[in-house]
Amino acid sequence: MAVIEKIRGKANLLLVFVGFSLVAFILGDFFSSNSGMSSSDANIGEIDGKKINVMDFEEKVQVQLNNYKLQSNSENVDQNTTEQIREQTWNQLINEMVLTPQYEKLGITCSPKELLDMVQGKNPHPQVKQAFTDPKTGVFNPANVSNFLKNMDNDQTGKTRQQWVVFEKAIREERIQQKYYNLIKQGLYISKAEAKDDFFNRTKTASVRYVTLNYASIADTTIAVTDAELKTLYNATMKKYKQEASANIDYVTFEVYPSDVDRQAAMFAINKLTEEFKVTENDSMFVALNSDSPFNPAFNKKGSLPLNIDSIMFSSPVGFVMGPYLENNVYKLAKVSAVKMLPDSVKASHILLKMDPAKKDAILATADSIKTALKGGANFAILAFQYSTDEGSKIKGGDLGWFSPGMMVAEFNDACFNGAKGDYTIVESQFGIHIIHIVDQGKQARQLRIAYVDKKIEPSSKTYQAVYSKANGFASKNAKGDVFEKSITEEKLTKMSEPNIFENARQVGAMENSRELVRWAFTAKIGEVSKAFEFGNRFVVAKLNERKEKGYSTLEQIKDQLTAEVRRDKKATMLIEKLNKGGQNLDAVASANGQTVQTADNVSFASPVFPSSGMEPYVVGYLMNSKAGQVSAPIKGASGVFVAQVVSFADVKEPSDLAAEAKQQLGSQLQNRSQYETYNALREKAGIVDRRSKFY
């Protein structure tokens, strides 16, 4: 059910239970390795004072992985998806442990009666309405919900009921969360004073005359900064410099490209096959035995083949072989394997039954019963919604729309293009058992089956070994790190840098699956050079420059920034002394300092800009709260020190409906922020400690 899929994606709900023994098996190697961690150290993190054991966490991850496999009809999950699921599981765990106690304190629940009303009441949940709306008419029929609930146990696999239970759990939790945040939103109030301040801050503008002396007018070299001054400023402002744990590395890459020998080997291999390919009578077997890519039995209409072979192949007889030719670094042979008159496109619907080898006969019997019912006039959309495991199409009544040859798996493709309009047929594919209805077909056209034999130009193991030896030699020669830069220059390599690698990062830069390098950066010593890591078609050697611990930046880490700030403050003191000459007359101040009086119009909080200086929010804030005609004392700004005078403020009248505007402007802004800020505040209060990087 598409609605269940959507809710599951948002809420990351659990579907099945995986035993503790499986998790123990997965993590057993970790605890027996040389990590030096005992079972008492096996906490992956801490949330609101509660420690999270890695075994318990990994068990939840395995449940989510099995959930994913169930929904995707796949037994394999790639590494990137696994990492995403692990991240989702962590965030879900935080949500549960941070928000659930809040619900319990306030007594917020969703009763069984309320849940029933959300499913079968007069105002059902929007996702229920969407799921049970007829895709053809766009009309929601409550009877379809009742029929579905009555018949969902007809699914002998139990999957339909399982999905529905998860769906109900999702909408119940969504309702509880909605109540919680609505309660907070209803408690927000904007006073008339706040509304008035906000209105004038947004609309009030001023015309200003000013004199400024820039910090750049005093050379940095003339300003001495002491360690004591830096320490004083650091102690006063260190909370501004909160940071996450991060590492700074430089690295070089050694790319693995095919050598000339590798190219010659691929060319030799394809040439050797050419004559035999021309005379073979079993093209599919020949391709299976000799090609780097599998045989594709699909037929192709004119214009769908690559431009370099399309016209040639469509003007050639069966058995014609073109090539060898080079395409995208692959040597190819192309053969006209068969010719057939087929529709150029098909419109079809299907019902997919998940295959279980142990119950194949029963599933085929179910498929045959569904086919018989359909041929007898049963509603395809209703049966698709009830039985199909294809979550993407069942919500559309099984409709797959129009598709061209080759877009579907071979068995499905052949059934649709070799059958006739109106046919109902049953086929088995890698995804399960399909009950197909051929709704319509395009016009018949001459189509070709092309058999390809290809040889990819790829680096050989010898080439990989040569590049690895070079990378490993570089790493060994620079093990101490002090000659790393010099060696890069001497060997004419390109140095790359990653200044902020965070502890839980899954990769460095664009290097996929480079988690191993991240972990190295958080265990190595400063100045250490890594071994040669292999990531895809490259080897990487890195040097650790710096590592920042979670908390606050050290004085040494932000010394340059603090030095600039102390220097600026000293310059400001000197410039203030200069600008005090001339008293309270702006023209006299300008004359005494060899400057001219400048002007700025329409200065406001929304646009705190001076033409000669750029953004100056502090100066503008000072002036917007001063009186017209009054010359200010020297004001320390971002680019220099100012003496300024508001010539006039624009005449802005307070609107009669200020209270209504407050609700519309400030109220909506505050409500829009409330959910995000509430959640972040609760997370901050929970004092979350994340130690996942120690395990993954």
Image (cartoon, rainbow, N blue to C red):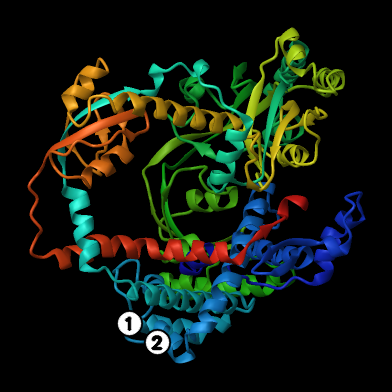
Q: Are marks 2 and 1 in contact (CB under 8 Å)?
A: yes
Q: Which residue occupies the foreground of this view, 24 or 495? A: 495
Q: Name which residue type carries label 2.
A: Asp
Please provide percent x and percent y for residue 54: 77, 63
Instruction: Tell me, yes or no, if residue 353 can be seen here.
Output: no
- Residue 467 falls in which quadrant of the image? top right
* Along the viewing direction, whichever of 567 and 89 lies nearer the viewer: 567
In whole angstroms, how far apart are the C-alphas of marks 2 and 1?
A: 7 Å
Residue 256 relative to residue 239: left or right? right
Q: Name the amino acid, label 1.
A: Asn
Q: Which mark is residue 123?
A: 1
Task: Classify mark 2: helix, strand or loop.
Answer: helix
Q: Could you say where residue 58 lies in the image, as x and y percent from the top left?
A: 74, 63
Give the residue at x 41% y 29%: 573
Task: Specify the quadrant of the image occupied by residue 235.
Answer: top right
Q: Splitting the image into 4 quarters, where does residue 528 fall?
A: top right
SS for dot 1: loop
- Which residue has dot 2 on it? 117
Image coordinates for residue 315, horizontal then vertical, percent: 47, 22
Residue 483 % position (x, y): 79, 16
Along the horizontal axis of the image, is 238 left or right of 378?
right
